[in-house]
Structures are given as structure tokens and as C-alpha cells.
Image: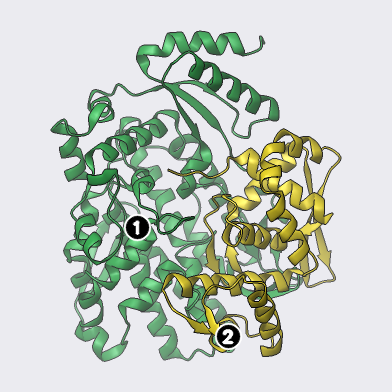
Amino acid sequence: MDERLNFVQRMAILTELVQRLGEVGRTSLMKLAYLLQTVKQVPLGYRFQFYLYGPYDPQVLSDVSVAEFWGALQEEYHAYGCDSYGYKIRPTEEASRLTEMEHETVQRYREAIEWAVQEFGNYNAAQMELIATLVWIDREFFWKSRKTTMRDLVQAVRNLKPHFSEREVEQIANNLHQKGILLSVVSK
Amino acid sequence: MSKVYEIRCPIHGFIELDEWEWEIINQPAFQRLRRIRQLGLTDYVYPGAMHTRFEHALGVMHIATRLYDAIVQRSGELLKSEFRYNDDGLRKDRRVVRLAALLHDVGHAPLSHAAEELMPRRDRDTFYRHEDYTAAIIRTALREAIENHPINATNYHIKADEVASLIEGSAELPRRLLFWRDLISSQMDADRMDYLLRDSYHAGVRYGVYDLDRLVNTVCAIAHERESTRQIVIGVSEDGWHAAESLVLARYYMFTQVYFHKTRRIYDYHIVEAMRKALPNGQLPPPDEQGIREFLQWDDWRFLGTIQAGQAGEHGKRIIERRHYRAIYSTAETPTPDEWELFNAIEAKLSAAGIPYYADSAEKQAWYNLEEMEIVVSRAHAAPVLLSTISHPVRNLRGIQQQRLYVPPEQRRQAEEIVAEVKPNG
């Protein structure tokens, strides 16, 4: 049977994340939700698929929009110069009302939320995309019972994200490996 | 010169296939789609909605090809510089995309998405999905037809694994195929473009009608930067954004009026429970070598036959007798916190009173989920933007989380009394 959290519980977890971070972009929040579900097995029930911009499930943004309707979150569009844009999500003064409504759920997954904030709270959107892509590929190798080397994993990621240098990918991949987040890597 | 076959389609006119594709669709695994209805038992509400996955698969291939050709024509130089394409490469990938579009649904269970709940666990945290079955079927039952046809052997050398990986969305796909995957599964994919028009036509409604030709005329590849990440995505040019808007709204109307219709939804529940009774072990076999052979034996005909033979339990009987559970309470499409509390209170009272009930939510219908449509619009004299920043209707669409409670018709009156008791006046 499907034991996924309901939409209110999910909104509470996302809101708690945003409260802890103070402010977060859509990409980062999407990837944090992916990591919570995939690495920490928080049963968010999202159905992530892999795109060029990494793991993505639009249900995450749907939950944010309902949380906004409930007055817990606020989303603002920002243009960065002439060429780039993003959305910033912030908690409102009413955010605690939602997290209190699902106090038990938030407490149950407090450790996982804390982990996400501590481990990834300082990364930017591009780095979060890279981290989530590394974990996705790692899990794909793992499900196929394929043991891999760090070099192969890094190469697989760079094939998809050529704008990252080998050094950048290696650094983040090694960091994830040291924290025990990667399952398929057996050697360098 | 390869022979060209034409199949009539009520939506697209003539759909063309060559000898290679003709052989593929004549395989038993593909012909099975003639026996899988697109919308389950939606004909219980809209009697015309008897169309099958077979015609839909052809339609998706047709639209995917139109989109592919339009993008290559309009954005060829960008594609060549970004992915190092030459003309031969573009021709080959056109065939890969066409095949993926044609075969994207071969892994559907009987009565389509309803039965997805009966797919077994893949691991502790995830369940198999129809895409996993599709990929397995392509790699096994359809491999020979894909790889060994002379047209492929001479000209393209396409492997079944490439087609399967494109549908699965494997991260091992070459970057250029991940780009094209957006035509199979994304906010602007050929799948939804076909099913909106087709479902609308067969249901006899107009909600799903949008300007497909204008979308094809304006679709393009766009290089855009979002939160300091640059990617190439499929979007529309500036003069096509209203057509993109019409696609988003069509999806919203079809979702709320057809796919999430209260009676249509409860029959999905009855189908699942009836199939649970009819299937060995109460679930579909996994998509491994033996399991896929068993899976391919299941289609609507077989399942409806088990209902007819009285082998699908109480819910099978309800389906035959049209004695479905009735909705006694429904929140708004996006419920408020108060409505959510009221819903929970009614549910608790029904449980305390010993009344069997079913609690449905819009998100259980993830396959036709109405998500935020992040369609990118290119602009001649400025950076690309998201459709939601220039379209007020799209910007103001919220996630749909409508919740409903259903009870057996025999207990409807008692349940409605409970609702009246719990619900505040006015």
C-alpha cells in the first residue's frame, strides 16, 4: 500500500524547510525535496523524473502554490539583470500555523529536515542541480546492480552537465561519498 | 523506396507509417493496445469515451514528429552548435523520437492508469510504473522488430535500448536525447497534446481543444538561464505564447471536468479493488522476464471477462450493476485549511459510525496531475521568460487538491446526515 504523506503533511515539511533556510529558490527546494525522499526516505511520494535540469516533479511546485494559498509561503519572481530570472520562496508570518497543524509530522522528520539544511543549505541552485544529478545517477547505477568508480560517476555527470569542470564535479562527488550518500561507488 | 501506410485518425486525419513502423505495430505487444481503453470506465459518464491506447499511440507519434520537424527547421543552428549534430544525426534521432512516441504506452495495464496502483514495489521506497513495463516490453517482446528490420539495419542502427532509455528518462541518455525527451514527457509533450484533443473529442466536450497548429508553428529550442543554470529547452516563440496558454487551460478544464469527474473517479477505485480480487497475489506481475510475459496476457477484455464471470468480488459486481459509491462531500478544488479540517471531521465520524467509505484526492490522479506549467517563451529583444510571468490565467492557477468522500449508495442517507451534522450552517 502507498504510505505517502498527504498534501498537508508535505506542505508542512516544505514550509519547515523554507523557514529554516529563510529564503530558497524553486530549484533548490525541488532538489532538497528530492534528497529528503531519496536519501532520507521521507515518504513525500513525489514521482521525480530526470530532465536536463536534474530530478524534477512539478507536484513540489503545486504543493508550494497551495501553501502560498494557505498563507504559509510567499513566492516572488526576480529578474537577475537582463538574462536570468528565478523565484524566491519565503515563509510568511503564518508559516508556523501550518507547521504546528502538522506538528507530529514535522517532529517525526525533524532530523531529516535538519540534515538537509545543514548539509545543503549553503549551496546555490546550480550546485544543488549538480548534487541531485549525482545522486540520481548513483541510484540508477545502484538499481541496476552496477558498481562504479568515482571516475565513471563523474564522467557520467559531466556528459550531462558539461558546463561544470571535472574538478567541481569531483569535489562535490567526493563530499557526497564521504558522507555515505552514494551507494554505487566502490573505488576511485 | 519504402511503402507508406496510412491510417485514418479522427483527430489528425491521415497518420503515415513506413514498413518498419508497420511491422512494429503489428506485433502482438502493440496490438494489445487495441484492447486497453484510454480512459478506463469513463464511458460510464461520457458514453463516447471508448477510444483506446492504440489510436492514442499513433497520434502521439504523429504530433511528436510534427514538433521535431518544426524545432529542427526553426532552431537547427542552435541544435547543431549545442549538440554537435549533423544532418544524419538529426535524421536518426527523428526516428528514435518517433519510435519512443509510438511505443511510450505499450506498458499500460488494463483500463489504463487506474491499475497503476496494482504495480508491485520496486524497492522499499518506490513502486514500478507503466514506463518500467514499457521499457521492459521494448527490450524483450519488441526488440527484434525494432532492431532487425532492413530499414533500420541499413540506415539507422537504432537499438531497442535507446528507445527504452528515452522513455525511462535514464540519466545515461546522451544529453541531446534528454533534450528530445521533453517531446515525450514534459510540460510541452506530444502525449498531452494528443490526449487532450482525443479525450475531448470522444467524450463529446470542448474543454480539451487548443490551437495545436499554432503551437507547432511556434515551437522552438531555447537557450535560457534560470537561477544561474543554463539549459536548452523546448518552448515557444513570443508569438506562440497564447497558444501555449490555451494548452495549459485546456489541461486545467479537462482535468476538472473530465479526468477528475466525481463519478469517473469512483469507478477508478472500483476497478482497482476489482482487479485486486482478480489478479493472482492481488497485484500485477513485476516487469522482469517472466513477469512481462504474464503482464502482456492482461488487457481490458480479460479483466472485464473476470468481472462478467463473477471473479472480481463485490467491486466487480458494482461495476456491472453501475451501483457505484456516491460522493457525499467534496472540498473546493483548492481547499482552505477550514475545509481540510471539516473533511477530516466528516471522515472521522463516518469511521466511528462504521460506514464504509472511500476518501479520494486529486493528487491520487498523478498521471493527469495539473502541475505548474513551466513553459519557456523566447523573446526577440529580451531574455526568455516563463509563461506564468506573462500570462495572468496561468500565473493564477493553483495546485488542485480537491478531496472527496464516497459511501455505498445503500448508506448514502445515513452518511449525508452525518455531513449535515458536522458541516456548519450557511
Q: Label 1 neighbourhood size at 10 Å, few (<14), some (14-19), many (20+)?
A: some
- B202 up-or-down from B4: above or below: above
Quick one: B379 or B329, which is closer to the camera?
Answer: B329
Where residue B260 sits: x, y (%)? 47, 36
Left of B423 or right of it: where is B35? left
Amino acid under disc 1? His
Q: Residue B133 appears in which quarter of the rendering?
A: bottom left
Tint applied to chain A in the drawing: yellow
Q: Which one is in front in this view, the residue at disc 2 or the one at disc 1?
A: 2
Amino acid under disc 2? Met
Disc 2 target residue: A150
**Which dot marks residue B217?**
none
Q: Residue at x 47, y 67 (%)?
A: B183
Quick one: A22 or B97, which is closer to the camera?
Answer: A22
**2 and 1 marks in contact (CB < 8 Å):** no
- The answer for which chain carries disc 2 is A
Q: Residue at x 64, y 45 (%)?
A: A10
- Please name the colour scheme applied to the rendered image: by chain
- B129 up-or-down from B231: above or below: above
Q: How many marks?
A: 2
Q: Label 2 neighbourhood size at 10 Å, few (<14), some (14-19), many (20+)?
A: some
Where residue B18 sits: x, y (%)? 24, 75
Secondary element at tag 2: helix
Q: Which chain is green?
A: B
Disc 1 target residue: B12
- The residues bearing labels 2 and 1 have C-alpha atoms spaced at a distance of 49 Å
Q: Residue B134 appears in which quarter of the rendering?
A: bottom left
Where residue A31 sits: x, y (%)? 66, 63
